[in-house]
């Protein structure tokens, strides 16, 4: 049976950490997808292939972010039903979420394949790397239904308080991905296409793992009628999922605009920028884990109408997030050059230039990392309350700050100005999120007191 957990009882810090730590380990293994792809491609195929990988990053992240937005949005309703003990409604919610996930994944599959090449050209991707970037994206986008399947199944488990099964699924998938990367890229010589194929096959394995566990959850007893689409429930689920998908999508559009600016600085700058961006997931690995924990924790406690536990949980989450971000930042400042060296190969001159670019960017992000951790914790708490509109506004703020900074700062600071666009984007989102959280809590406490 899955390790479902009621988070409406017990010490908040212990619950949040207990839920987050398995997710953190799982996210570390998930980052192996990205890191191993980058290491194998960068070392085996050179700086040009690494730049091709980087040129496709934000477009790939946009599609993945939309998928994750829908899955996480649907799971909010699941956590509310579970916290309230409404297991029959929970089954109906899960069944309708699966139907919506299938429809959205097929629509995304068609749209992404049609738009991949025009967007790469719009982003001024250097002609020398367009073909490799497009090949990589074509294969990844063909697997969108698979990626959606894993994300919605993992979201179901997390809504029930099970953070360990997604961990085990990700460990299995990461190991498979590493083995297939080595086989396809180095052994069979499939190049950048092999790295994409390895990622999709690994996602299939992680999805099947989660499905096997969900089928053993005793409280989930589905009936035929559960899979009949309810108009009211479907609209409610889309009301939760669409803003989160839009939020991730608009953030990614901002990233693509940044990438278009970076593309104008040449292949070596793209390669250095890409090497650090591949560590972005490592920098925020704990932040996303705390975020998932807060969505479930807040959602369950809201369903149980235990507002005082939401406040104490937020204090605990912010404290542990600040400590974690400081530790990760210190590690990157101390060992960043050695880590980045795993991604970069070429002539000594090219390696030196690429390394300087990459480490400077990594240092900037590390110093300001606490801002990102506040963003994840507070945004996820709001989402757990069922509010996906204000987090969406914070995504728009991120977009405006990121793109405005990327377009203006290089005019005054040169190429290095682009590195501060990310920091200003985080700060812009935090202003909206922190203010919204306090206003939302005051309103909800007043409503329940009345």
Image (cartoon, rainbow, N blue to C red):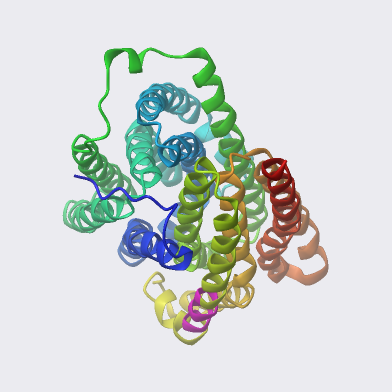
Instruction: Give percent across and percent down for residue 8.
Output: 45, 52
Residue lying farthest to the right in this orientation: 412
* Relative vertical location of residue 32 with respect to residue 107 in this rendering, above or below: below
Instruction: Give percent across and percent down for residue 255.
Output: 62, 50
Q: Residue at x 56, y 73 (%)?
A: 319
Residue lying farthest to the front in this orientation: 450
- What segment is highlighted magenta in the picture? 324-332
* Relative vertical location of residue 97 with respect to residue 188 in this rendering, above or below: above
Instruction: Give percent across and percent down for residue 444.
Output: 69, 45
Secondary structure predominantly adopted by residues drawn in magenta: helix
Q: Residue at x 47, y 45 (%)?
A: 300
Does the rendering let one see residue 226?
yes
Q: Residue at x 37, y 12 (%)?
A: 228
Is 20 inside the magenta-drawn segment?
A: no
Name the one closer to the observer, 183 or 375: 375
The answer to whether 407 appears left or right of 300 in the picture is: right
Quarter that holds the C terminus? top right
Quarter that holds the N terminus? top left
Name the image quarter holding residue 339.
bottom left
Q: Residue at x 38, y 37 (%)?
A: 152
Does the rendering let one see residue 130?
no
């Amino acid at each position: 049976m899955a390790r479902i957990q009621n988070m409406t009882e017990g010490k908040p810090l212990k619950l949040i950490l207990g839920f987050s730590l398995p997710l953190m380990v799982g996210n570390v293994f998930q980052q192996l997808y990205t890191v191993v792809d980058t290491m194998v491609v960068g070392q085996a195929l050179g700086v040009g292939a690494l730049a091709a990988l980087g040129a496709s990053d934000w477009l790939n992240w946009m599609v993945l972010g939309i998928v994750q937005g829908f899955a996480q949005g649907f799971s909010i309703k699941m956590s509310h039903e579970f916290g309230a003990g409404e297991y029959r409604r929970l089954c109906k919610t899960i069944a309708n979420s699966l139907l919506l996930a299938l429809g959205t994944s097929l629509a995304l599959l068609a749209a992404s394949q049609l738009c991949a090449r025009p967007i790469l050209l719009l982003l001024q991707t250097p002609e020398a790397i367009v073909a490799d970037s497009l090949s990589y994206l074509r294969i990844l986008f063909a697997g969108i239904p698979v990626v959606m399947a894993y994300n919605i199944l993992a979201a179901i488990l997390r809504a029930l308080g099970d953070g360990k099964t997604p961990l085990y699924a990700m460990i299995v998938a990461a190991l498979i991905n590493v083995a297939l990367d080595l086989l396809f890229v180095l052994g069979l010589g499939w190049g950048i296409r092999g790295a994409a194929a390895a990622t999709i096959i690994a996602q299939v394995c992680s999805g099947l793992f989660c499905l096997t566990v969900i089928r053993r959850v005793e409280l989930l007893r589905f009936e035929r009628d559960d899979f009949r689409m309810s108009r009211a429930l479907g609209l409610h689920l889309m009301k939760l999922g669409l803003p989160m998908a839009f939020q991730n999508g608009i953030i990614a559009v901002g990233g693509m605009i940044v990438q278009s600016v970076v593309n104008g600085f040449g292949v070596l700058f793209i390669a250095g920028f890409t090497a650090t961006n591949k560590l972005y997931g490592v920098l925020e690995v704990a932040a996303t884990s705390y975020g998932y924990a807060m969505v479930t924790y807040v959602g369950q406690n809201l369903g149980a109408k235990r507002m005082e536990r939401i406040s104490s949980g937020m204090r605990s989450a912010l404290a542990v997030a600040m400590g974690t971000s400081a530790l990760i930042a210190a590690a990157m400042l101390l060992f960043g050059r050695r880590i980045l060296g795993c991604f970069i190969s070429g002539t000594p001159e090219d390696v030196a230039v690429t390394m300087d670019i990459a480490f400077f960017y990594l240092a900037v992000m590390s110093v300001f990392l606490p801002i990102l951790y506040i963003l994840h914790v507070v945004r996820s708490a709001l989402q757990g309350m069922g509010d996906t509109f204000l987090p969406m506004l914070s995504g728009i703020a991120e977009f405006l700050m990121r793109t405005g900074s990327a377009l203006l700062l290089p005019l005054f600071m040169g190429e290095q100005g682009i590195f501060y666009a990310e920091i200003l984007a985080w700060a812009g989102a935090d202003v909206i999120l922190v203010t919204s959280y306090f206003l939302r809590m005051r309103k909800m406490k007043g409503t329940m007191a009345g």
